Amino acid sequence: MPIDEGVNVDVQFLILEVKKQAAASLSYIENPTPQKLTKIHSREDYINNLKNTLENKSYYNIHQHTGDKRQMNGFRALITIASNLERCADFFERIAEQITYAEDVKHFDDFNLRVYYKVVYQGLDIIYPALVENDLDLAQKICDYEQELDNLYASSFKVIRANLRQRKQVDDMLCLLFIIRYLERVGDSFLNIGEAILDIHVGEKMGIKQFRHLRKGLESQDIDISSANVEFKPVMNTRSGSRVAKINRLGPNKISVFYKEGERKKIDQEVEGLNLWHSLYPDMTPAVLWHNSRRQHSTIILEYIEGDELLEVLIKKRTRAEQCLKLLNKTLSEVWQSSIKAQATQATFVKQLLGRRADVKWVHDNLFDREENIDDLLAAAKKMEEGIQSPFSTILHGDLNIDNILFSKDAKKMHFIDVHRSTYGDYAQDVSVFLVSTFRVPVFSQDIRQQLDKANLQVFKNAQKFARKNQDNTFEARLALGLFRSLITSTRFLFDKNFSEKMFERAILILQQVLARQDRLDKFKLKKELFLHG
């Protein structure tokens, strides 16, 4: 990372002074004298001043270098590095102070604390070259020293615990326990420093494990993340808990890929969903370029599909709206028809709602109290639902939100994304999710609402036509249950109390209407006013 000369010098001096502080604490452990402790205390003030100076210069440069993102990332990393270096110095000072409680420092000889300090020196020595040379291998090595110090700590801890159980040198063992704990925490700071250097290349906080898998996945696509021609663009505001980004390799051989890392179960389910779609409709979803699954997390690199979300089309690019809606409905009909399996299925909407009831209450604790007989209604709905099925199964998106549907710039191609819930089931579930995803959009402009209502009405009529064609007589009753479920569960994403209450009330109204016709659900007709704003 190119940095100005003043900052360059400050970084080198800060590292040097921390290393001096480390050496001083080791010297004090081996041969404590009052003069050594005084010098350690006095050096701490200088280190604090260096840290503050470096932070102030970094903040100043962040505001000055508005055009170069990697340069700005570098100065952000310097703030983290300076803070953690100063924290290391604090630990060395605390170690020296801890020695004042020891009865005989010779009791520490068997623990060979010099091994800890050797790791510390190695880590400090490579921070500066890792930073200025954009050396990802060195940055990862800094992170690795955290594990080395953890291992040393675990080994020493076992011996200390055994000695304490035998009542051997109790005071000195307690003193030593604090010392090795401070040294172990130096490793935590090394991890923060190494990750901060790695984060220069991605522009956001990322753990060493995630970075290693990201780098490995990109290398499989011939993308070197350390290159200045690679840009990492995080996708913000995802509710999935996954880390998501678009990664571009610029230049003559430019390429874009989509990166996602998160909970293993969810990511692996998405891979299964993508494979399912590709087995039937190869061009409908992104291709999986690379996939790695570990114990708790998984990483995928996907084909990046350029396009606009349907929501953006409806709000900002309305000249294409009609064409996109026609393509959406045509595609849904063709997918449902061509994937039909003569196997009845139940969507279990009420069960899904009950499974998310606690999550809704965390956001709106009194929402369910607005209906006095809510438990009776839920019990009746569950019983009714158990008696109706879709007469066939079709492939489902599983989360057919309006922002999971992409259209090409010419509106001639459509793609699905986020297919981690894709499976075979009741198509009424996809329809209900779509209708509620437009209904809950936090936009109250009458003009925009008309556009969203138009989309809902067209999707509903298209699904209604498909149901009639395939003699599905209870589609609208099942859709009503799906709307009931989605209207309520969607409130967990909204902090607007009034709007959430309106959605809840509408859900109850829908449920009451379908329950009133439960003796002839094949004759139930869903009123369009229930999923439109009007």
Image (spheres, rainbow, N blue to C red):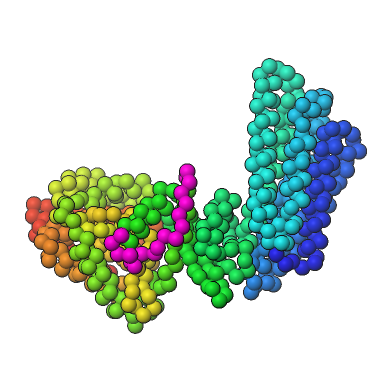
Q: At x 64% / y 41%, what residue is drawn?
A: 147
Q: What stretch of residues is rendered in magenta?
A: 279-296
Answer above or below: position of 309 versus 488.
below
Q: At x 67% / y 34%, what residue is drawn?
A: 153
- The verdict on residue 287 being magenta is yes
Q: Quadrant of the N terminus?
A: bottom right
Q: Is residue 511 left or right of residue 84?
A: left
- Residue 54: image quadrant is bottom right
Answer above or below: position of 31 versus 56.
above
Q: How many marks?
A: 0
Q: Quadrant of the C terminus?
A: bottom left
Query: x and y percent of residue 156 in the render?
Result: 69, 30
Residue at the right extreme, as displayed: 35
Q: At x 77% / y 68%, what residue is drawn?
A: 4
Q: Is residue 154 left or right of residue 252?
A: right
Query: x and y percent of residue 494 in the render?
Result: 39, 59
Query: x and y percent of residue 47 in the render?
Result: 80, 51
Answer above or below: position of 258 versus 175.
below
* Viewer-side residue, 354 vs 15: 15
- The verdict on residue 392 being magenta is no
Instruction: Say if residue 451 shows up in the picture.
Output: no
Q: Is residue 290 left or right of residue 202?
A: left
Instruction: Say if residue 6 shows up in the picture.
Output: yes
